[in-house]
Each structure stands twice: as C-alpha cells, then as structure tokens.
Amino acid sequence: MIKGKQLKIGDTIAFISLSAGLAGIPALAYRWQIAKERLEKMGYHVVLTENALQPPEFLQAHPEKRAADLMAALKNPDIDAIFCMVGGADTIRLLPYIDFSVIKAQPKIFVGYSDTTINHFMFYHAGVTSIYGPAVFTQWAENVQLSDYTTQHFFDLVAEKKVPLPLESAPVWTSAILDWNNPENQLVPRTWQPETHGHEFLQGSGKVSGTLLGGCLETFFMMMGTKIWPSATEWQGKILFIETSEMKISPEWLQIFLRGLAAQGIFHQLNGILMGKPQDEEYYQEYKDVLLEIIRDECQLPNLAIVYNLNFGHADPIVSLPFGCEVEIDCDQHTVALMEAAVE
C-alpha cells in the first residue's frame, strides 16, 4: 500500500464535505470553526475545499462537485492532509467522478468514518492507505474539549508513527448527542459512561495478524458489485473491522448483512474480525450473539479470532484504524495492536 507523509507541525489540513452538507448550514458553522481553531492552536494550518460550505441541497444535487473537491485537494501540493466534515448517506454517488490515478499519484492522509467508508474503499482500490478516524463535526469539535483518548491515538498514528501501537479499551464512552442547533450546548460536556465490558475476545487462540479492511457495515451493500468492492480472494489474510451506525440496525438486519458477506465466502478468507461498540450499547448482547451465530455456527469457523466492543466508529472515544496496515490480535493475552506505521 502507498502511504501519505507523516503529519508535521505547520502542515496544512483541508476540511472537506464529501457526504452530508452540514458545514453549509449557518447555524452549525461554529462546529467546524471550533475544530479549525483547535487544530490551528496545535500548530497546523486549516483550509476549506471549494465546496465545503455549500448548502446541503447543493451538495446533494452535485456529487460531481464533491468529487472534484477531493481530486483538487489531492492535486494541491500545499495540502498535506484531508479531514472529512461528517458522514451521511450518499458518498457512493461520487464513484463515477473519481480518478483513481490521482489518488495513487498524490497519496495523502485522509481521515473520516461512517459513510466515508466508501471513500476509504476508493483509496484502497487505488492502493493507498487512508484512516478510519475522527471527523470534524463529531470528534474535532467535541463539546467543551477534545477527547484525550481520540486525539492521542490519532497523533500517535499519523504524527509520531508509533509502532506497535496498542488498541486499548477506553475507560469511558458516550453516544450522547446534544442538539447542535443550539450553540450553547457546545459549552455542555456530554455524559460519559464508565466502560464495564472492555474488549471481549469471543473466540480464537494464539496470535493472528493481517491487514485492516472494513468500516461502517451499512455502507457495504452500496459498494457490492462496483469496482471498489474487493472480490472474495482479495479479503484473504485480512482483519475485517466492522461497526454499526446511528441507525442502530436490529439484530435481524445484522444477520442479513453478515449472511450477505458469508455468501461471498469472505469470512473464510479472513484472519480475524474486530467489531466496534454499538452506539448507546443498544443490542449489545444481541449483536454479539448474532456474530457468533453467523461466524461460528453457520460458517463453521469456531477458531476465527473475533474481538468485540472496540472503540472505533459511532461511539466515542475512538481509535484511528489505517486501511491496509497490519494489526495483531493476541487471543491469549487479550491484546490488539497496530504493527505497521500508517504514514511514510
């Protein structure tokens, strides 16, 4: 995999709107402005792509403009990293307008999660590492102050190049959302819950390793059948990471999604599976039961390493996961660690 360059103080970060156009809503502008101020206080320079602040209706109607922003940011030699504003539901519509040769020729740090999963698969198709991690509106604009867990892990990954980098369970978590339409809520800390489960090693033994590939499960079925969806054999040796969104799909829908992957033969190619904490811990036990039902029983893979309740995706705080980089699962010692640097 081709990697972007290590992030350094003084580098330029571009904020981009590739999915929902929340940054173009005047009442919500304070969110991205706070994120910008915080990153600039750290010593980085922050710019906006041409269409980052267009109204939601404009961006929804013009996926080609969103794609053009991404291509322009990659081509711009003055931009070192690209941070997505927020997720959404229609990033797949950018696909016809993506020039994969540009992604490959201009590798840069690219960060986001949720619907941004689809952008990550675009980068992966081009052979370029990208990072499933903090978005502008959610993590970088965290109420009151940034999460030490989220930011420390991100900068350890992209600025310090620390390896091995343990993926440790956060001591607290939250899925609380205070109404962004009321800017006074920015001064109110979200309610954090103590972590009572930690990482749950559901099955497997010894050490296994593989390169990371995955994201938000609900986006997968928009990609299937397209050029960016890997064939079954391309999943060989991978560590699949999956998480579910604020949609809070029912256990029955999780069954359907996982059976769709099973029907492609994907699970038989994997070296392991990491699953994130469900938002609000809703269906916490049910998701775990479904995961084992499909993998252990229906696929008859009782030895495939599965770790549940990791901190990535739609429940904060989060680690950052680099696509195409090696991770090691030690089922006996109950540890997970990134073993490969995500940047050059």
Image (cartoon, rainbow, N blue to C red):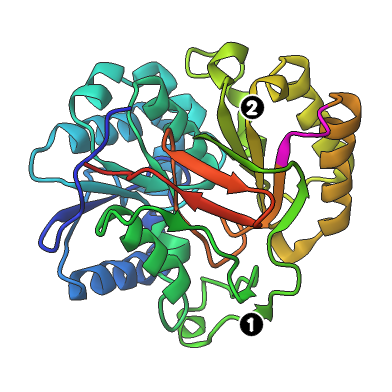
| Left or right position of 187 against 1 | right
- Measuring from the top left, give residue 167's x and y in whole percent: 52, 58
Identify the residue under disc 1. Answer: 191
| Res 130 seen here | yes
Crowd tier of the residue under label 1, counting other residues whose Cα lies within 10 Å: few below 14, some 14–19, many 20 or above: few
Residue at the spot 13% in from the left edge and 63% down from the top edge:
9
Q: Is 159 drawn above or below residue 254 in the view shown?
A: below
Residue type of the residue flagged with mark 2: Leu
| Left or right position of 342 against 204 | left
| Res 313 seen here | no
- Measuring from the top left, give residue 80's x and y in whole percent: 17, 47
Task: Tell me the number on the disc at residue 154.
Answer: none
Residue at the spot 65% in from the left edge and 57% down from the top edge:
333
Alpha carbons under labels 1 and 2: distance apart: 37 Å
- Measuring from the top left, give residue 197's x and y in whole percent: 75, 68
Q: What quarter of the picture does the N terminus occupy?
A: top left
Identify the residue under disc 2. Answer: 270
Q: Earlier in the sequence, mark 1 or mark 2?
A: 1
Q: Secondary structure at mark 2?
A: loop
Crowd tier of the residue under label 2, counting other residues whose Cα lies within 10 Å: few below 14, some 14–19, many 20 or above: many
- Measuring from the top left, give residue 164's x and y in whole percent: 40, 53
Residue at the spot 53% in from the left edge and 85% down from the top edge:
189
Q: Quadrant of residue 342?
A: top left
Q: What quarter of the picture does the C terminus occupy?
A: top left
Q: Which residues are magenta?
A: 301-305
Q: Is 144 drawn above or below residue 76 in the view shown?
A: below
- Residue depth check, mark 1 versus mark 2: number of the one nearer the observer: 2
Residue at the spot 28% in from the left edge and 46% down from the top edge:
82
| Left or right position of 336 against 323 | right
Give whichever of 127, 30 is nearer the camera: 127
State yes or no: residue 303 in magenta: yes
Residue type of the residue flagged with mark 1: Thr
